[in-house]
Image (spheres, rainbow, N blue to C red):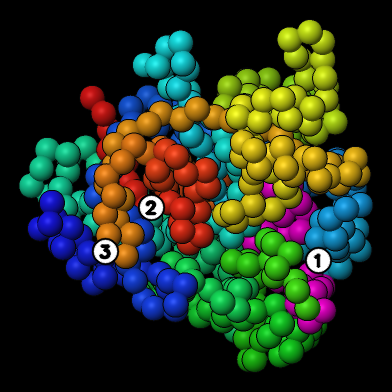
């Protein structure tokens, strides 16, 4: 074990499997020594959902009435959602092309009555800042190295989502058609996941001769300006504005940050994502789409059935759900049996969800109006497996659960889809007794898949 661990740490550092820790030291990103096993049938089923999910979200994002109807109540107590809705209603800039970089996250649900049966259940669909396309590939490379002389090595499932994401960005820039085009990467001031982002930037430059300019929203407000509709940063035109930030209220802690976002939205830059696409990725919309009549407004019956098979129960807090005696509001059911649910606000990133007794404390402190900004999800009972987690050189072998994310890219011109494809996967493995699953938030480790016979 010690030999393999030392080799793994050295390999990860040499090959860029890195992050900044809380002390701003360069350390290897958290990873597992052993990959997660999955059947070919299950993996193919998950992967096959990427393109129809992208198509669904394209259509949802184009439905202004749906977004307004279901997010306006949340906006009454959530200033962040309120400001995004205002920007959407103003409709500042023109954007004929819609480029999507998405990730569809699943856990494999295990029925207590039949533990041998596993069912993929959707955790969430991410439309903004889909992280780890570079580090997931680096983790896969690490496992290929560690198991190069082992039978397991031949069963590893290759992934390099960075290639597909970079190719999508490059094609979109070509269609934008400007000689001084660049990617404007919107970042957080205190970014710990910088190496994952840099991996994308360097590939775009080396393979496509496309520069990337990294700026916070405040910096964009300070140095950016409009020229003939283009967003100018220095001598470059921001053909694509790629958000690796702006998904949390903390990214808008100053008026200058909102000025930066307004400037972006007033331009012809292709926003990844656009305001309506970011709104479509809100958890409230995920909840709304579990209603059979609503999802069928956007996709055909067969597609709706395939997607619904991965849905778990998601409820508005005031929604009536079945109880032992008679239907009761979801929030009341959660107070009685909090262990069965996860309480989620309209937030992205790790560390924002509530579990168990946390749910009781949060609900008891909420007003009726505040409840509109949350959704309640049935807790997914994921398959457990043993894994060795490696965090800053320290190991822990324990029972874990693994979340699988499928990256997708999609480019559309108005309503016409130009390309739509799955480009690879991400696996995050965490201790089974840990609720949250964010790598940079310190909860989970990067992993790979291997095919079980």
Q: Which residue is mark 2?
A: 445
Task: Say if residue 58 shows up in the picture.
Answer: no
Q: Residue furthest left?
A: 149
Q: Which residue is mark 1?
A: 94
Q: Is residue 361 above or below residue 315?
A: below
- Identify the residue at image location x=21%, y=37%: 155
Closer to us: mark 2 or mark 3?
A: 3
Q: Earlier in the sequence, mark 1 or mark 2?
A: 1
Q: Are marks 3 and 1 in contact (CB under 8 Å)?
A: no
Q: Which residues are magenta?
A: 255-282
- Identify the residue at image location x=54%, y=29%: 380
Q: Position of residue 282 (x, y in %)?
A: 72, 47
Closer to us: mark 3 or mark 1?
A: 3
Q: Position of residue 179 (x, y in %)?
A: 59, 82
Q: Is residue 49 above or below residue 34?
A: above
Q: CA distance from mark 3 to mark 1?
A: 49 Å
Closer to us: mark 1 or mark 2?
A: 2
Say which mark, if any, is on residue 395: none
- Provide the secondary structure element on which disc 1 rests: loop
- Identify the residue at image location x=59%, y=54%: 351
Please state if 441 lies on the left or on the right of 86 as rendered.
Answer: left
Q: Earlier in the sequence, mark 3 or mark 1?
A: 1
Q: Label 3 crowding class (10 Å Cα cut-off): few <14, some 14-19, many 20+?
A: some
Residue 276 in magenta? yes
Query: Which image quadrant for residue 206?
Result: bottom left
Task: Say if residue 128 shows up in the picture.
Answer: yes
Query: Which image quadrant for residue 366?
Result: top right
Q: Position of residue 403 (x, y in %)?
A: 45, 41
Camera-nearest residue between 392 and 404:
392
- Provide the secondary structure element on which disc 2 rests: strand
Residue 296 in magenta? no
Q: Which residue is mark 3?
A: 393
């Amino acid at each position: 074990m010690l030999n393999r661990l030392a080799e793994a740490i050295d390999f990860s550092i040499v090959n860029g499997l890195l992050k900044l820790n809380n002390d701003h030291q360069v350390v290897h990103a958290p990873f597992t020594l052993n990959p997660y096993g999955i059947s070919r049938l299950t993996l193919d089923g998950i992967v096959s959902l990427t393109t129809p999910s992208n198509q669904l979200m394209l259509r949802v994002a184009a439905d202004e009435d749906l977004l307004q109807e279901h997010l306006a109540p949340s906006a009454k107590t959530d200033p962040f959602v309120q400001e995004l809705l205002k920007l959407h209603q103003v409709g500042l800039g023109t954007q004929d092309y819609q480029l999507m970089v998405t990730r569809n996250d699943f856990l494999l649900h295990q029925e207590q009555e039949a533990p041998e049966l596993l069912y993929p259940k959707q955790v969430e669909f991410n439309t903004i800042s889909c992280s780890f396309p570079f580090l997931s590939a680096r983790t896969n490379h690490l496992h290929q190295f560690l198991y190069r002389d082992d039978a397991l090595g031949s069963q590893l499932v290759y992934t390099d989502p960075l290639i597909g994401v970079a190719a999508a960005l490059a094609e979109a820039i070509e269609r934008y058609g400007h000689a001084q085009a660049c990617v404007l990467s919107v970042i957080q001031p205190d970014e710990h996941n910088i190496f994952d982002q840099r991996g994308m930037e360097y590939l775009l430059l080396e393979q496509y001769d496309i520069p990337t300019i990294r700026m916070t929203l405040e910096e964009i407000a300070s140095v950016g300006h409009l020229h003939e509709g283009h967003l100018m940063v220095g001598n470059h035109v921001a053909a694509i504005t790629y958000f690796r930030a702006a998904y949390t209220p903390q990214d808008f802690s100053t008026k200058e940050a909102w000025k930066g976002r307004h400037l972006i939205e007033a331009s012809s830059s292709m926003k990844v994502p656009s305001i309506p696409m970011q709104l479509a990725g809100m958890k409230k919309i995920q909840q709304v789409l579990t209603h059979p009549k609503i999802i069928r407004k956007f996709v055909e019956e067969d597609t709706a059935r395939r997607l619904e098979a991965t849905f778990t129960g998601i409820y508005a807090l005031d929604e009536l759900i079945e109880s032992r005696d008679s239907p009761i509001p979801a929030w009341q059911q959660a107070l009685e049996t909090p262990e069965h649910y996860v309480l989620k606000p309209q937030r992205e990133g790790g560390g924002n969800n509530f579990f168990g007794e946390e749910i009781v404390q949060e609900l008891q402190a909420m007003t009726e109006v505040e409840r509109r900004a949350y959704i309640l999800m049935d807790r997914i009972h994921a398959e457990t497996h043993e894994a060795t987690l490696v965090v800053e050189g320290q190991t822990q072998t324990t029972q874990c659960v693994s979340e699988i994310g499928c990256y997708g890219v999609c480019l559309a011109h108005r309503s016409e889809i130009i390309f739509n494809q799955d480009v690879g996967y991400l696996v995050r493995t965490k201790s089974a007794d840990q609720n949250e699953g964010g790598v940079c938030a310190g909860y989970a480790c990067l992993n790979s898949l291997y095919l079980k016979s």
